Amino acid sequence: AIVNFNGTLNASNVRFASCTASSNGGALFLSGPGATASLSNGNFTGCEAGNGGAVYSENGNLMVSSHTFQANTADTGGDIYATGGAVVMSNVVVRKSSATSSSDGGGGSGFFTDSVKVSLASVSVSLVSSSDSGGVYSFEAGSVGSLNSVSFTRCQSSRSGGAISIVGATLTAMNISIDQCV
């Protein structure tokens, strides 16, 4: 739907539905250290891609507030796949998304990050699944993250880390709720 190479995207009240990409970013693809996307009051529903069913960010900066991610699918990063750059999210709902890759390093039905600075505040994640690790959040080498007031409900992984998977990364978590995650 949208490709952003080193540009700036400010979007409010935008609905992305049933967007697909054969490789990365079903609805939004960010690339480059100058690529920035600020999204508010919208949703991503039924988007699909190889990596990042809704959003793929490569060294970009993604800011999302008051958004819903629902029923998005990818091999890795059902909703968001980010490598390099930063992801900041607040007042976000994630529901019924999935990551289908069963290979090592796959997973993260909600979010998958690799060498990314991440901040999530007031985020609710429920009914998501992953074939590998990190039913919701796969946090890979070099990433530094902060989770505050984040809830994980009925999340599952076929392999490990039903809610969160941390591999060689640093994560600070406060006011977290994990309920019925396997």
Image (spheres, rainbow, N blue to C red):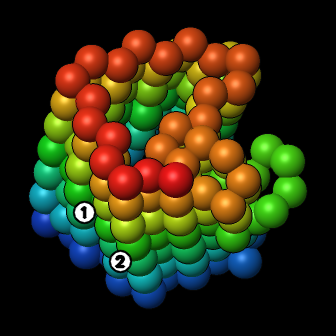
Q: Taking 164 as reference, is 69 left or right?
A: left
User: Which residue is at the front of the view, 166 or 87?
Assistant: 166
Q: Amino acid at mark 1?
A: Thr
- At mark 1, the secondary structure is strand
Q: Residue at x 57, y 26 (%)?
A: 116
Count of all numbered marks drawn on residues in the image = 2
- At mark 2, the secondary structure is strand
Question: Dot 2: within a 10 Å radius of its alpha carbon, few (fewer than 14), some, or many (20 or more) residues?
Answer: many
Q: Taking 69 as reference, is 100 left or right?
A: right
Per the rendering, the mark at residue 40 is none
Residue 42 visible? The answer is yes
Q: Residue at x 80, y 62 (%)?
A: 102
**Closer to the N terminus: mark 1 or mark 2?**
2
| Residue at the limit of the structure toward the right, as seen here | 103
Q: State the image coordinates of residue 113 (x, y, percent, origin top left).
A: 60, 37
Q: Taking 104 as reference, is 68 left or right?
A: left
User: Which residue is at the front of the view, 144 or 6?
Assistant: 144
Q: State the image coordinates of residue 49 (x, y, percent, origin top left).
A: 64, 72
Q: Which residue is mark 2?
A: 45
Per the rendering, the mark at residue 68 is 1
Labels 1 and 2 touching (C-beta < 8 A): yes
Q: Amino acid at mark 2?
A: Thr
Image quadrant where residue 140 sits: top right
Q: Residue at x 56, y 13 (%)?
A: 170
